[in-house]
Image (cartoon, helix red, strand yellow):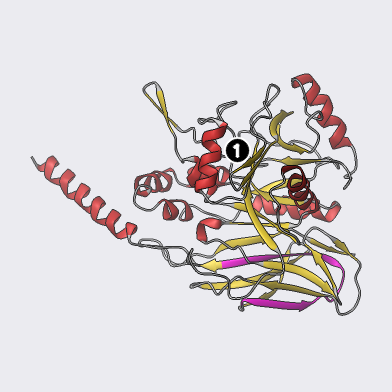
């Protein structure tokens, strides 16, 4: 009888705490709040590193596409594992959602995400993939090459690069929710279990309380950027394949929830038109050139954020190489004021250099270097947690020579 009373008391406390969590809104910018001023660019948000049931995912491509629509994405790049028999039938527009297929490939002890404009430029088997990627990685980067090669989740026990990083690598995944969760499990299994228990009441909080800055990935990105232009990406690493249950699979977290955690935001000077071939070239070019930032959209949609270098009447977007001269300015603008503490930070050559607590930044660049921006916020998390600084937005690098 005593055990029953204790159980019912604990369960009642759990439900009461769950109700408290369900009333907590952690979004720093309300979804219905429009930007305070018009942006100079068109901002399109999308995801990469997504697997379907054509490999080790749990849903069909069309089901995943439907979840991407429900998440409000503008573009989706499917990257099934070793897609040697992959079909191209889903490529195209599905309503307002742009969809293209790439692939995630085993290479040595690592995983590579591969996107190409040429459908014929995809490996046909494991042996062909090894030769194909060895050849690309041995080359110097080439902006005219119609492919992008990204190192996925570089610091996990699932796949880790060993040895020197090759010159042909275009970029690295910096933010990966599955990696963040795995590292949280190593730090404290009890904390992860508690996050799973409170997930039904507040999925946003259950992840944010586990979030830690991906310092290893950022250090690698900064290291490679000093050697050559290197793109930084977020990857959702979505397969919705977590818990076997009888003869079925519990889809946790769902594709839609994964798509709402982190996104890549490309900035374009002209709108997408709805023409698949033309828009495919636009999106690919923006990713290849680094004209995008990535963000923790779980904290709020940053659409309307801009960052660029202004040289008199000329604008240079993220990812570009710019000749140093006097009076060139790095400018940034938030879409609106976050409701929590925030700061815009300039990172120069991998080190924190300058900070403003304003929705706009104008910074005269004093010398050559590698510059990027991060926007950090400090929302008040529910009890027993408290205020916690988290990076909301990461820009790609500006290379001032």
State the residue at coordinates (85%, 52%): 227
Q: Is residue 186 visible?
A: no
Q: Is residue 355 visible?
A: yes
Q: Does residue 185 lie above or below 373 as drawn? A: above
State the residue at coordinates (55%, 61%): 301
Mark 1 lies on a secondary structure that is loop
Percent across and percent down for residue 128 are 80, 22
Any magenta on residue 331? no
Q: Main secondary structure of the magenta part?
A: strand
Any magenta on residue 360? yes
Residue 27 relative to residue 14: left or right = right
User: Where is mark 1, residue-wise?
Assistant: 50
Q: Which residues are magenta?
A: 359-376
Quadrant of image for the C terminus: bottom right
Q: Residue 145 lies in what quarter of the image?
A: top right
Percent across and percent down for residue 230 are 79, 51
Percent across and percent down for residue 106 are 70, 28
């Amino acid at each position: 009888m005593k055990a029953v009373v204790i159980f019912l008391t604990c369960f009642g406390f759990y439900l009461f705490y769950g109700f408290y969590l369900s009333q907590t809104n952690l979004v720093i910018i309300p979804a219905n709040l429009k930007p305070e001023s018009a942006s100079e660019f068109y901002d399109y948000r999308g995801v990469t590193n997504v697997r379907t049931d054509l490999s080790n995912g749990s849903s069909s491509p069309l089901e995943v596409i439907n979840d991407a629509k429900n998440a409000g994405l503008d573009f989706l790049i499917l990257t099934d594992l070793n897609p040697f028999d992959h079909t191209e039938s889903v490529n195209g527009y599905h309503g307002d959602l742009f969809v293209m297929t790439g692939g995630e490939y085993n290479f040595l002890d690592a995983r590579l995400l591969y996107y190409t404009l040429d459908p014929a430029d995809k490996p046909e088997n494991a042996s062909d993939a090894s030769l194909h990627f060895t050849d690309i990685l041995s080359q110097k980067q080439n902006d005219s090459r119609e492919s992008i090669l990204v190192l996925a989740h570089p610091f996990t026990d699932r796949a880790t690069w060993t040895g020197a990083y090759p010159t042909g690598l275009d970029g690295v995944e910096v933010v990966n929710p599955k990696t963040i969760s795995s590292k949280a499990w190593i730090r404290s299994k009890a904390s992860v279990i508690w996050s799973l228990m409170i997930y039904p009441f507040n999925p946003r909080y259950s992840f944010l309380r586990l979030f830690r800055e991906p310092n290893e990935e950022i250090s690698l990105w900064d290291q490679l950027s000093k050697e050559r232009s290197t793109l930084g990406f977020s990857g959702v690493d979505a397969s919705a394949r977590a818990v076997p249950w009888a003869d079925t699979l519990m889809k946790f977290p769902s594709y839609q929830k994964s798509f709402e955690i982190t996104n890549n935001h490309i900035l374009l000077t002209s709108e997408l038109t709805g023409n698949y071939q033309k828009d495919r070239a636009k999106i690919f070019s923006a990713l290849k050139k680094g004209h995008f930032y990535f963000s923790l959209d779980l904290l709020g949609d940053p659409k309307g954020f801009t960052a660029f270098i202004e040289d008199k009447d000329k604008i240079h977007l993220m990812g570009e190489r710019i000749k140093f001269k006097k009076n060139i300015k790095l400018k940034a603008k938030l879409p609106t004021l976050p409701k929590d503490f925030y700061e815009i930070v300039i990172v120069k050559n991998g080190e924190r250099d300058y900070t403003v607590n304003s929705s706009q930044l104008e910074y005269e660049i004093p010398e050559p270097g590698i510059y990027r921006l991060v926007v950090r916020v400090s929302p008040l998390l529910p009890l027993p947690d408290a205020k916690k600084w988290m990076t909301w937005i990461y820009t790609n690098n500006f290379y001032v020579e």
